[in-house]
Image: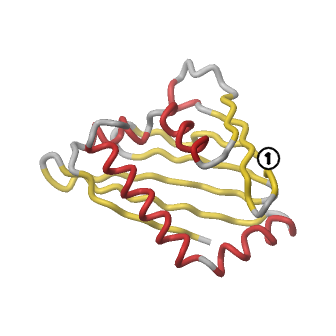
Amino acid sequence: MKLTAQTRVEAPKDRVFAGISDIRTLESLARERGAEVTRLDRGADGPAGAEWRLLIPLHGRARAGTARVTAYEPDDRIAIAADLDGVTALAELVLAATGPGRTTMEVDIHLSARTLGGRLLVQPLNLARGGLEERLSRRIDAFARRIEAGQA
């Protein structure tokens, strides 16, 4: 399953990238949504080597997993891969300058089931894809507004 969202940000590409690659902000956003996030690496490599242990509430249960930054190209893109109870997720955030002080941010999330339990998690999400993409778009827009306001 693939979810996609895109938004325009009224900020230069380097400032937007600083916002999307701020690991503390990403961790805080996950915690605001009910996830327990534990950083596994020491953070010496910055975002490029980041790795976490996660506990995420989903379908009435806490789901355990791990996540790590798999691609880090300053000012262009960052990708995070996660494994969670039989489901593999890859989130990729790509930036493109569309003018002076203006950036387009595109987010692609790929979910795939590795086990029968994973299929049971992903199937209801497939059925609700339209609503999920709408929520993703709203959250990405809200994050873009935070970046514009200098809060991320």
Q: Residue furthest bottom?
A: 127
Q: In the visual, does 80 lie left or right of 62? A: left
Residue 51: x %, y % from top left? 65, 34
Task: Please report the residue visible at 47 percent of the width from the left and 39 percent of the height from the top.
Answer: 72
Helix, strand or loop for disc 1? strand
* Residue 131 higher or lower than 70, as above or below: below
Q: Amino acid at mark 1?
A: Ala
Task: Please report the residue visible at 81 percent of the width from the left and 56 percent of the height from the top.
Answer: 61
Name the residue nearer the viewer: 49 or 33: 33
Residue 6: x %, y % from top left? 37, 63
Q: Quadrant of residue 124?
A: bottom right
Name the residue nearer the viewer: 107 or 32: 32
Residue 17: x %, y % from top left? 35, 40
Task: Report the colour scheme.
Answer: secondary structure
Locate the N terminus by quadrant. Answer: bottom right
Residue 73: x %, y % from top left? 42, 40
Q: Residue furthest right?
A: 116
Q: Quadrant of residue 122?
A: bottom right
* Residue 148 higher or lower than 132, as above or below: above
* Residue 148 higher or lower than 5, as above or below: above
Name the residue nearer the viewer: 8 or 74: 8
- Give neighbour class at mark 1: few <14, some 14-19, many 20+ (Cα, 10 Å): some
Q: Which residue is mark 1?
A: 64
Q: In the visual, does 19 lie left or right of 113? A: left
Q: Quadrant of residue 14?
A: top left
Locate the C terminus by quadrant. Answer: top left
Q: In the visual, does 150 lie left or right of 108? A: left
Q: In the visual, does 97 lie left or right of 142? A: left
- What count of labels does the image hold? 1
Q: Residue furthest left?
A: 100
Task: Please report the residue visible at 34 percent of the width from the left and 36 percent of the height from the top.
Answer: 151
